[in-house]
Amino acid sequence: MAFTDKIYVKNHRQLASQLETSIPKGAFAGATLDILYSGDGLSKLDSTTRDRILDFAEDFLDCDCQANPYCGCPEEKFMRYVLELRAEGLGPQAIVDVMTDDYMVYAYTGDVLSFLDNSVRNLEAIETLADVEGNEEMSERARQAKRELSG
């Protein structure tokens, strides 16, 4: 299961009530994106909720792909966002708190920790492969990124 499949809409029931329809809990689920980001869906929401959803759309759903938002770009951008928060020194719980404040989405702390751990392991593999191939630049980039994530 992908990390972004474990990102959930905060106040899911309240949103469903405002929208007068049921929506999946997953923030990146196709039906959630369809309902929340259609003009009709947004017009039914209170201004605070609408502002956060628009921020989410602006930051993660803005790409030029024909299949947008089902192209994979939103998920990639969101993972980059989480990695940037970690590089700023935030721990898993703080990352969850920030994503909730910024976009009204949340994840379980253990899922964030697992994602970060997997990211470090992937960087270790990249570093090793780059060393084997003699690609010093890539090896150093992976090493630096690993240091940023490891704290």
Image (cartoon, rainbow, N blue to C red):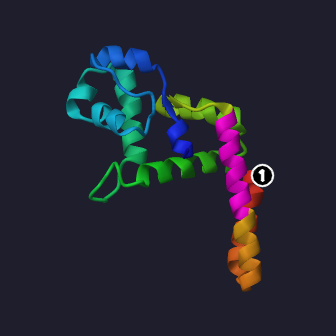
Residue drawn at (54%, 29%), measured in percent from left and top? 100
139 lies above or below 13: below
84 relative position to 41: left or right: right
User: Exactly how many numbered labels are in the figure?
Assistant: 1
The x, y position of residue 14, in whole percent, is 40, 15
Report the front residue among 17 and 140: 17
- The residue labelled by disc 1 is 150
> For residue 138, what is the image quadrant?
bottom right
Residue drawn at (35%, 25%), measured in percent from left and top? 23
Which residues, given as a range, are shown in magenta? 110-123
Report the front residue among 3 and 147: 3
120 drawn magenta: yes
Residue that extends furthest to the bottom in the rendered view of this protein: 134
29 relative position to 115: left or right: left
- Magenta span: chief secondary structure: helix
Amino acid, disc 1: Ser
> For residue 36, what is the image quadrant?
top left
The x, y position of residue 44, in whole percent, is 26, 20
